[in-house]
Image: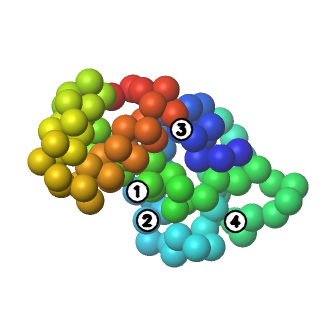
């Protein structure tokens, strides 16, 4: 299961809780395998276990938080337009990625 599917199934708030709980583990070798409806454990990935990269989950949560900070999807798109018009490319690129991430999950902000 990829991070987008995981957030679609669990929601942003539940995913953020999982990220916060596992934040002390290195991103490169901690994965979340779904074991029960509300329980996840950190394991090394295997070909047979469904897993979600904690790094990818963190990226989606940061995207959600950025879009939420900007006032939701519609306002974030307006801010993106303004940042592009003002030539604030690095900020605009990050916001554009955040908007795409949130839309891929299905909105919710």
Q: Image point 51% across, 33% down: which residue? A: 105
Report which residue position mark 3 lands on. 7
Instruction: Look at the numbered disc 2 and give the secondary structure of its residue.
Output: loop
Determine whether label 4 and label 2 are within 8 Å by CB: no
Which residue is outermost to the right? 48
The reply to whether callout 1 and callout 2 are in contact (CB within 8 Å) is: yes
* Dot label at residue 51: none
Give the x, y percent position of residue 65. 30, 44
Q: Which residue is mark 2?
A: 23
Front residue of 104/7: it is 104
Sequence-first tag of 3 and 1? 3
Q: Are marks 2 and 3 in contact (CB under 8 Å)?
A: no
Q: Secondary structure at mark 4?
A: strand
| Residue at x-position 60% and y-position 58% | 53
Disc number placed over residue 43 in the picture, else none: 4
Q: Residue at x 21, y 45 (%)?
A: 84
- Residues at marks 1 and 2, CA–CA distance in whole angstroms: 5 Å
Residue count near mark 2 (Cα–Cα under 10 Å), binned few <14, some 14–19, many ≥20: some
In the image: residue 66, left or right of residue 46: left
Q: Position of residue 42 (x, y in %)?
A: 63, 63
């Amino acid at each position: 299961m990829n991070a987008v599917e995981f957030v679609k199934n669990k929601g942003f708030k539940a995913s953020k809780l999982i990220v916060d709980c596992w934040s002390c583990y290195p991103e490169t070798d901690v994965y979340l395998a779904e074991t029960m409806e509300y329980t996840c454990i950190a394991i090394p990935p295997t070909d047979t276990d469904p897993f979600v990269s904690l790094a990818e989950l963190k990226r989606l949560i940061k995207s959600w938080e950025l879009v939420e900070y900007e006032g939701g999807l519609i306002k974030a798109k307006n801010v993106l337009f303004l940042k592009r018009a003002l030539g604030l490319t690095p900020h605009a690129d990050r916001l554009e990625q955040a908007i795409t991430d949130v839309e891929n999950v299905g909105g919710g902000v």
